[in-house]
Amino acid sequence: MTDRKTQLAANLAKVEERITAACVAAGRKREEVTLIVVTKTYPASDVRILSELGVRHVAENRDQDAAPKAAACTDLPLKWHFVGQLQTNKVRSVVGYADVVQSVDRSKLVTALSKEAVRAGREVGCLIQVALDAGEGGRGERGGVAPDGIEELADLIGEAPGLRLDGLMTVAPLTGEYAGREQAAFERLMDLSTDLRRAHPAATMVSAGMSADLEQAVAAGATHVRVGTAVLGVRPRLG
């Protein structure tokens, strides 16, 4: 086993222990929580090792890094998630490899994703990114729509050809009433998910929690956690 594979296997095992312990504490079954490994800034060789170690979901946040990486890994049984803020001029490329776009936060993006999904003959899953630091009708510091904008976006996605409404995503906010209150933020997202499922019963996915706060996300009821640093190590600086 290579040094890198040994390192990644050990890190994955620690994260697995954390998720399992969080599930036990919350009275949940381990299979209720899916691990998504965020591979941004790391090479395709790491993605390949992760696949060998049993990882099936990986996430990227920049198309210029993700597109060549996904192209180099087309032989692997992976589901690719796009989790970064997405500009409409990158949509065609992202639709080429992303199975799920977790950062849908405006109607213009829904229109662009639908057009490209139809053109590519693909069905793309969409999560509405919810900004819990946004005022009414506003947007969050790191993207996302305010809670009062969820219903309109959900209906748009639900009617858009080539798209599938899968659920909601959030990032624990750094400002506003939920700053430093990760579990309260994730519990609020779960309440919003319950509301969403009344009109869109299939939209059951709740993506929340990262390396530092995955336990709080599992406790709140998240179905997917997005873990990067705890698996791959501290990211190299860009630029």
Image (spheres, rainbow, N blue to C red):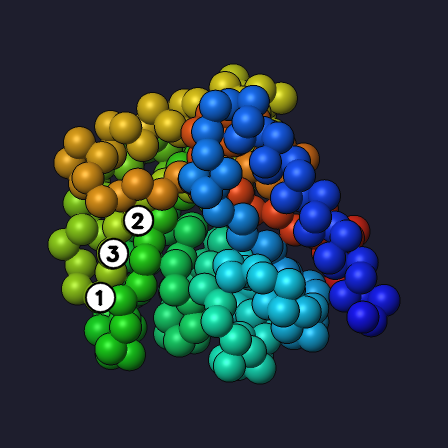
Q: What is the quadrant of residue 68 in the picture?
A: bottom right
- Whether pointer 3 and pointer 1 mark residues with C-beta atoms closer than 8 Å, the reply is no
Identify the image quadrant of the N terminus: bottom right
Q: Residues within 10 Å of mark 2 (few under 14, many from 20)?
A: many
Identify the image quadrant of the C terminus: bottom right
Q: Is residue 182 left or right of residue 81?
A: right
Marking on residue 162 = 1
Q: What is the quadrant of residue 210 in the picture?
A: top right
Q: Please name whichever residue, 182 or 204, is drawn nearer the observer in this view of the structure.
A: 204
Q: Is residue 45 left or right of residue 31?
A: right
Whether residue 189 is visible: yes
Q: What is the quadrant of residue 237 in the picture?
A: bottom right
Residue 180 on image: x %, y %: 62, 21
Residue matched to label 3 = 164
Q: Please name whichever residue, 90 or 37, is drawn nearer the observer in this view of the structure.
A: 37
Is 39 rendered above or below residue 43? above
Is 91 rendered above or below residue 223? below
Q: Please name whichever residue, 143 or 81, is drawn nearer the observer in this view of the structure.
A: 81
Q: Marks 3/1: CA distance?
A: 7 Å
Residue at point 48% right, 47% down? Answer: 34
Residue matched to label 2 = 166
Q: Is label 1 in a helix, a strand or a loop?
A: loop
Q: Marks 1/2: CA distance?
A: 13 Å
- Please state which amino acid type lies under the numbered disc 3: Arg
